[in-house]
């Protein structure tokens, strides 16, 4: 795939269709969309009156929080591995 090649993948998130255009393969895009849909469903279960926009923002905040925790854990693990190598 050249740098200008992009794939179009249509996914469904929270009962709405979205066409995602990017360089990732369709399988990866579907996986990401599925995880977003699952997270939105989890949050919606605990907050049944949330409108879609607020639900999307809470999903993004929760996902970014999870990402930052994993990034921090990864950095600690790398540090630990480097200490053992020394």
Image: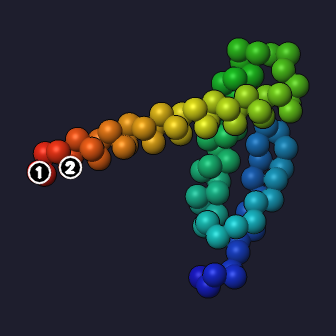
Task: Give residue 66's position: percent from left, percent from top.
Answer: 54, 33
Can you say which quadrant of the picture contains the N terminus?
bottom right
In the picture of the structure, the residue carrying the numbered disc 1 is 86
What percent of the width, then of the height, locates residue 78?
29, 47
- The answer to which image quadrant residue 21 occupies is bottom right
Q: Is residue 9 left or right of residue 85?
A: right
Q: Which residue does the image show at 62% across and 85% down from the upper left?
A: 2
Residue 17 locus on image (x, y percent): 83, 50
Is there CB contact under 8 Å for labels 2 and 1?
A: yes
Tell me the SS state at disc 2.
helix
**On the image, which quarter does residue 8 sit in?**
bottom right
Is 19 left or right of 64, judged from the image as shown? right
CA separation in Å, label 2 and label 1? 6 Å
Residue at horizontal 32 percent and vertical 39 percent from the top: 76
Q: In the rendered view, would you say 53 is above or below 42?
A: below
Q: Which mark is residue 82?
A: 2
Crowd around label 2: few <14 · some 14–19 · many ≥20 (10 Å) = few
The label number, if any, that marks residue 3 in the structure image: none
Residue 84 drawn at (x, y percent): 13, 45
Label 1: element kind? loop
The residue at the point 65 percent across, 44 percent down is 34
Q: Nearer the viewer, residue 77 or 42?
A: 77
Disc tally is: 2
Above or below, 77 relative to 39: below
Pick whichever, 26 or 72, lies toward us. 72
Structure colour scheme: rainbow
Crowd band around label 1 with a 10 angstrom C-alpha radius: few (<14), some (14–19), many (20+)? few
Q: Is residue 12 left or right of residue 61?
A: right
Residue at the extreme bottom of the image, as rendered:
2
Q: What residue is drawn where x is 36% and y is 43%?
A: 75
Q: Quadrant of residue 65?
A: top right
């Amino acid at each position: 795939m050249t740098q200008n090649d992009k794939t179009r993948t249509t996914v469904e998130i929270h009962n709405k269709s979205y066409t995602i255009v990017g360089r990732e393969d369709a399988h990866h895009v579907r996986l990401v969309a599925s995880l977003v849909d699952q997270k939105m469903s989890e949050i919606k279960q605990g907050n049944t009156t949330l409108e879609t926009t607020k639900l999307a923002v809470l999903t993004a905040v929760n996902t970014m929080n999870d990402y930052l925790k994993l990034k921090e854990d990864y950095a600690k693990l790398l540090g630990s591995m480097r200490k053992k190598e020394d």
